Each structure stands twice: as C-alpha cells, then as structure tokens.
C-alpha cells in the first residue's frame, strides 16, 4: 500500500476543543479593544 499525503492542517478546528467561550474572553479583551480604538483615533488625528 502506498499513501501520498498532499497536505496537512495541524490546526484543524474539527479536532481542537475551544478552551474558552466568547463571553468568557470578553472581560480580558475589552481593555485591548479600547486601547486599539484609542490608537486608531490617534493615528487618524495625526494623519489629518
């Protein structure tokens, strides 16, 4: 028997169990999203 592997996807979501749900991540991501918004506003102001 001869098997030819054409591609491998080690991060296939079918076999990866999510560790946290979106609602669980929201408190940790909120400050990052706020900071990103601040930086985007600053960039827009500096370009203008």
Image (cartoon, helix red, strand yellow):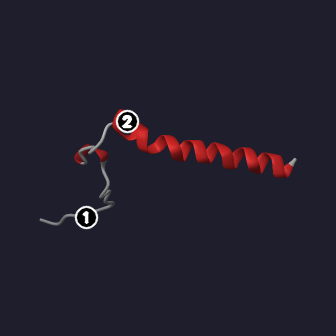
Position of residue 10 relative to residue 19, above or below, is: below
Q: Position of residue 46 (x, y in %)?
A: 83, 52
Residue 14: quadrant of the picture: top left
Q: Position of residue 44 (x, y in %)?
A: 79, 46
Residue that appears at 42% across and 44% down: 28
Residue closest to the far right: 48
**Which residue matches tag 2?**
22
Mark drawn on residue 20: none
**Which residue matches tag 1?**
4
Residue that appears at 88% across and 47% down: 48
Q: Is residue 24 left or right of residue 3?
A: right
Residue 24: quadrant of the picture: top left
Q: Nearer the viewer, mark 2 or mark 1?
A: 2
Q: Is residue 9 left or right of residue 46?
A: left
Residue 6: quadrant of the picture: bottom left
- In which quadrant will I find the N terminus? bottom left
Q: Position of residue 40 (x, y in %)?
A: 70, 46
Judging depth in this view, the residue of 18 and 28 nearest the camera is 28
Residue that appears at 42% across and 39% down: 27
Element under label 2? Answer: helix
Element under label 1? Answer: loop
Judging depth in this view, the residue of 25 and 2 nearest the camera is 25
Judging depth in this view, the residue of 28 and 14 nearest the camera is 28
């Amino acid at each position: 028997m001869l098997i030819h592997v054409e591609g491998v996807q080690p991060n296939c979501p079918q076999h990866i169990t999510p560790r946290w749900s979106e609602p669980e991540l929201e408190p940790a991501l909120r400050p990052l999203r706020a900071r990103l918004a601040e930086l985007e506003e600053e960039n827009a102001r500096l370009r203008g």
